[in-house]
Image (cartoon, rainbow, N blue to C red):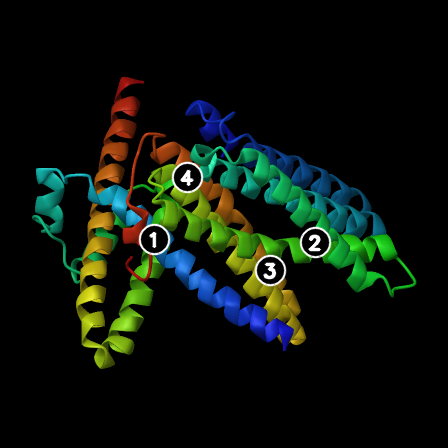
Amino acid sequence: MVVCAIKKGAFRKYFFLNLYMAASVVVTIVRFRVLTSYGFTSSEYIYLYYYSDALLTIFLYLALSSLYAHVFSELQAERYVRFGTLILLAGTALFSYGVVEQSTTKLISRFVVELSQNLYFVGLVLTYVLWAAILKLRETRARLVQIVLSLGVYFSLFAADYALRNLYPSMRSLLISFLQVFGCFLPLAWAYAFWRLPEEARTVPSRLAVVPR
Amino acid sequence: MMAGIILACSVVLLLQFFVSYCRSLIAVSSKRVLSAEVKDVTGIQRLASGDDFKRVMQLLQLCPERPEDRNGVQAIGAYFRLLNFLRSTVARVVPSMQAWTESERGHCAYFAAVALERRISFSRDMLAQQMDS
């Protein structure tokens, strides 16, 4: 996806999206190295997995806030978006801390896992709000619309998988294996958007909505 | 309880995003005009029908796969199955849904025909490169 963005001259414009994808590649390589050196059940791998997952989730959250900045760029609202992003991130962190506060052991590790899960759900809600804003503001940039929609699909898949794991703990291992498949969706969809759609391509988002507006 | 609410919300949002995403893929391809050759092969002249989809997909599978198209083709395949499901269930009760699903199925077939055209030209380019080398 990063290669497609560089080739199409969109690396700087969508910097946070590319940062997230580049970080995902680095994290995957480091995880693989630790996995082969220490093993799947080692504490080194488990710590690395959850801490890097939280870091990636924060990067994805920043990528989402940069999409907000793109959509609201004509309203000169970048400063407010940045401020709102930080407030919401701090609020989610505080809420997560509140949930794990009672734990006596491994407080930081539990906090990291909780923050990561909560940020995914906040991300899903924020993506839906962004899609509503796109429809309301009649945003026509086809590439931006497709990036936001694919992010919405990705967040929804993860949230549904997370909820199913909680509802059916016996199917946990099967549901976790689905995450690997879902994880491929976002880079492929974004690569497609960068490769196939030129920046000047336009679409009518109201026609894409499930309920016509 | 909470997990159930999250599941319900995420499934509703997933459907909403998925349908919009597929329609955005279709909207991009619908602007392309099919070549006379692909029109002959697929039998699609101007407007595609949902019944063409299966045949066009079979033709598509005969051509070498292009990695950048794979995701889109799979997504539209899943969307087509969702439309078939709606057509055989909800659309029987809601008549307006029947026309909508039929038109969407036609758009899916047109998307597949555009993908077929891309794959044919990709295969030709590959063959030309092999001949040159």
**What's under tag 4, amino acid-wise?**
Leu
Q: In this figure, which residue is indicated by the disc labeled 2?
A: A92
Residues at circles 3 and 4 in contact by the CB criterion of under 8 Å: no
Residues at circles 2 and 4 in contact by the CB criterion of under 8 Å: no
Horizontal side of residue A177 vs B18, given as left or right: right
Q: Residues within 10 Å of mark 4 (few under 14, many from 20)?
A: many
Q: In this figure, which residue is indicated by the disc labeled 4?
A: A144
How far is mark 1 from mark 2, CA to CA? 32 Å
Tag 1's secondary structure? helix
Quadrant location of residue A81?
Answer: top right
B40, B21: nearer the viewer:
B21
Residues at circles 1 and 3 in contact by the CB criterion of under 8 Å: no
Disc 3: host chain: A
Viewer-side label of 2, 3: 2
Q: Earlier in the sequence, mark 2 or mark 4?
A: 2
Q: In this figure, which residue is indicated by the disc labeled 1?
A: B22
Disc 4: host chain: A
Q: In this figure, which residue is indicated by the disc labeled 3?
A: A177
